[in-house]
Amino acid sequence: MAGTFELLPSGTGSFRFVLKAGNHQVILSSQSYASRAAALNGIESVRTNAAQPERFERRESRAGEPYFVLKAGNGQIVGQSEMYAAASGMENGILSVARNAPEAELKDLSAA
């Protein structure tokens, strides 16, 4: 099963997206974007940067939970994972984003 980007409305006139794996689990979430076009550019950035392992930054929350962010070439964060119980889950999440993002279908739910 292939992954899916879902473009969603977020608040008053803003947009965000999530990347879901083939099992429909969210594996990456975006920030809020001021326009639909900016959110679509964010999706393209995820597609491009997910293929570059050095763009994934491993982090730990204040509660000690591992998670990761995906950064664009300019260093800006284009997506963040959920919090994981263990580093192995985080590593699997990174692999899932790298595997799913490049060919993921886009579902535009922003007009729904």
Image (spheres, helix red, strand yellow):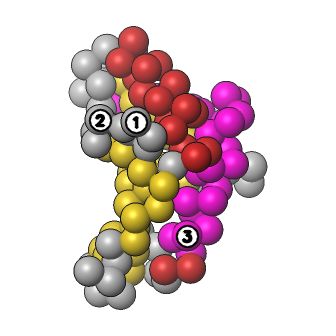
Q: Is residue 69 left or right of residue 50?
A: left
In the rendering, which numbered label is found on residue 23? 2
Looking at the picture, which amino acid does disc 3 mark?
Answer: Leu
The vertical placement of 63 against 42, above or below, is: above
Q: Residue at x 40, y 71 (%)?
A: 108
Q: Is residue 75 visible?
A: no
Task: Pinpoint residue 54: horizontal percent, then vertical percent.
Answer: 70, 30
**Which residue lies at the image location 32% right of the left edge and 72% below the top edge?**
109
Point 42% across, 51% down: residue: 4
**Badge 1: residue crowd in 10 Å (few <14, some 14–19, many ≥20):** few
Assign the magenta stretch its main secondary structure: helix
Q: Which residue is mark 3?
A: 40
Looking at the rendering, the stretch of residues picked out in magenta corresponds to 38-62
Does the residue at mark 2 contact the one at mark 1 (Cβ under 8 Å)?
yes
Q: What residue is shown with label 1?
A: 1
Secondary structure under tag 1 reads loop
Q: Earlier in the sequence, mark 2 or mark 3?
A: 2
- The amino acid pointed to by label 1 is Met
Q: Give the secondary structure at mark 3.
A: helix
